[in-house]
Image (tube, helix red, strand yellow):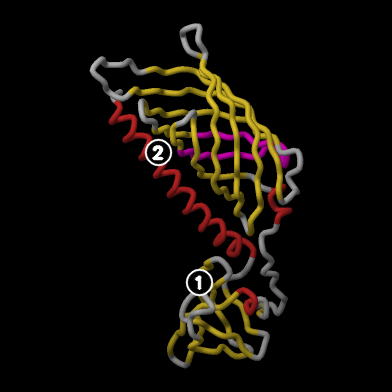
Amino acid sequence: MNGRLVRYLGTRLLLALVCLFVAVSAQARVLDFFQTYQPEVVVSDPYIEMHTGPGRGYPVFYVAGQGDRIQILKQRTEWFKVRVPRGQRLQEGWVHVEQMRHTLDLEGNQIDFGKIALGDFARRRWELGLNGGDFGGAASITGYLGYALNKHITVQFEATQILGNFSDGLMASGNIVMYPFPEWRVSPYFTIGTGMIKTKPHTTIVQAEDRTDEIVHAGTGVNVYLSDRFILRMEYKRHTVLTSRDDNQEIDQWKAGFSIFF
């Protein structure tokens, strides 16, 4: 496998992880609503304001009155795109969640549009993250997917592309991550794991040989809860590359990025 192919596969892998990260983030927000609430609600306040876009900077162009039925089409952050009958026509616009809280379901019951809170992290099942940093002096980009066995222990799978001045690499690993205090807003964690690393030296006058080695690591990090499902994640790992020679290599890795949970 030549260096160009290594970089190509690594770039495609990380691009796929970015797309998956964005898609799952957006889809998780939509599923939260449609799995919990009915897609049609009734205005209980004297009126609610509809904006032309999902933000307070967009002008109000229509007001739905008390008793009007609103069909919910989709959600974007704290805004809902809705459809309201207007005579013989249908009017579509955006309503803020604070006003959506003044609606009822079709049976006349109050709807709870509660936000995702810090305590929901302890009830997560999946984590998905993307971060970048330094791997022994080389730039690194990492994507990961984790499954929570319980609120304290997560099984995690990582894929990393390493871009250095003298060599490139791809690393895949499986990890156990331990959260002693998952309910804290600033929550430390510890991780151990193992995997494989593929190193491709850049072409020189003398052709260097590609290497594939086993790698083990231990590390620590911290999650900083931001809002909704989003977490700022900072991490340090100490890697040991188990080479076929008697000169195992120790490598430090620092990285930071963002994660979501669902």
Queried whether the magenta region covers residue 157, the answer comes back as: yes
Residue 209, given in percent of the width and then of the height, sits at 33, 15
Q: Which mark is residue 73?
A: 1
| 9 sits left or right of 145 in the view | left
- Chief secondary structure of the magenta span? strand
Furthest toward the left, the residue is 205
Looking at the image, which residue is at 65% across and 76% down? 98
Q: What secondary structure is marked by label 2?
A: helix
Q: Is residue 88 above or below residue 96?
A: below
Q: What secondary structure is marked by label 1?
A: strand
Q: Are marks 2 and 1 in contact (CB under 8 Å)?
A: no
Q: Is residue 88 above or below residue 26?
A: below
Q: Residues within 10 Å of mark 1 (few under 14, many from 20)?
A: some
Residue 125's quadrant in the figure? top right
Residue 134, given in percent of the width and then of the height, sits at 49, 35
Q: Which mark is residue 100?
A: none
| 144 sits left or right of 177 in the view | left
| Residue position marked by numbered label 2 in the rendering | 13
Q: Which residues are magenta?
A: 141-158
Q: Nearer the viewer, residue 197 or 201?
A: 201
Looking at the image, which residue is at 54% across and 31% down? 253
Looking at the image, which residue is at 60% across and 60% down? 32
- Hey, what amino acid is under mark 2? Leu
Queried whether the magenta region covers residue 154, the answer comes back as: yes
Looking at the image, which residue is at 71% across and 55% down? 118
Q: Nearer the viewer, residue 58 or 255?
A: 255
Q: Quadrant of the N terminus?
A: top left
- Hey, what amino acid is under mark 1? Leu
